[in-house]
Image (tube, rainbow, N blue to C red):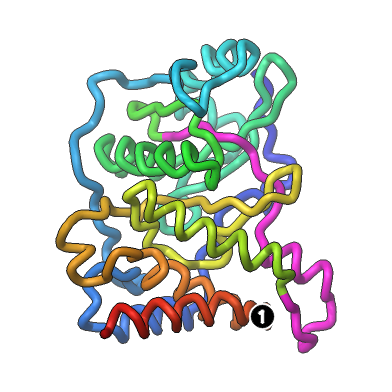
Amino acid sequence: VDLTNSGVSNQRRRTGPKSFHAAMASQSDDSDVVPSPRKKRRTGRGGASSSSSSYSSSSNSTELTNAEENDMKQLAKLTRRAIESKYQISGKKGKEGTTFVAQGASGKEYAIKLFKATKSSAKIQNEAGFQKLAAAQGISPRVMAVNTTHKYIVMEKLEETIVDLMKRKYPIEKQPRPLTDAQQHRIIEICEKLDAAKVVQNDGNPLNLMLDKNGTIMVIDFGLAKKIDKKVIKKRGPEPNINLTLWHFHRQLRHYRIQGPQLSARVDSYMASFKK
């Protein structure tokens, strides 16, 4: 297995702007919104699997190819010591860990999210489980393997964040950066399909919107996700990701001068009908 941290600076997860967390922290009545950096992240629900490592079955809509399954026989069993000592990747970057790129025996590259060693197996299983539900809707990278002993998830590799794309497209710092109609429709679709998956992604940091090799926008990072249950619906209505996640995306895209008026219109329309 060839692990590489080439381009790690572009692959590692970053937290959002401080204004994002400050805005979230100021909403004291919304217990299910993202906490400030000083607050501890929420735990997931449910228990950990009895297996320390596993890779996705080929019996569902997010099935692995034969080559991917062979790659996972190795990548699903990496040790933390090998990752840390050889590649200077500790899982200590950011609040939750580090994402880096690994190459399987087939030559295909994958993203590996290495969590802090203190993160519980149950939380890792929950995060992977929520992402699998989103992936089944075609809006998140597939989860290839989960290792709860050495604390990492293997998933499909994405290319860049929507923020990086728009900065590259509109490099002048104070220049407006308008999203295309197709991009706005896709971000709205992601939130609608999250609702269909019964998952509140709950972290509308625009750095969680990434593009695959075909330029399709995907959503990542389910560390704060929660199941859509009756309590959530009572508080947020039938489309909680429109209420929460899309609102957060739109608000924080503006921090980067990225414009998406259709996102705001969708939120406003929903809130107007929900409050009636």
Residue 192 appears left or right of 24: right
Q: How many marks?
A: 1
Residues 162 and 234: in front is 234
* Percent position of residue 57, x then y: 44, 17
The residue under the point 40% across, 50% down is: 222
* Percent position of residue 213, x then y: 74, 42
The residue under the point 45% across, 44% down is: 134
Quadrant in the picture for the C terminus: bottom left
| Range covered by the magenta-colored residues | 152-178
| Tag 1 residue | 259
Q: Using the rendered view, name the quadrant where residue 47 is placed.
A: top left
The residue under the point 75% across, 63% down is: 165
* Percent position of residue 136, x then y: 47, 37
Residue 185 appears left or right of 215: left
The residue under the point 36% across, 43% down is: 130
Q: Is residue 90 visible?
A: no
Local packing at callout 1 (Cα closer than 10 Å; few below 14, some 14-19, many 20+) is some
Residues 271 and 33: in front is 271
Residues 180 and 22: in front is 180
Q: In this view, does 76 lie above or below 267?
A: above
Q: In this view, does 78 lie above or below 130?
A: above
State the SS at label 1.
strand
As for residue 59 lying within the magenta part, the answer is no
Q: In this view, does 62 lie above or below 255?
A: above
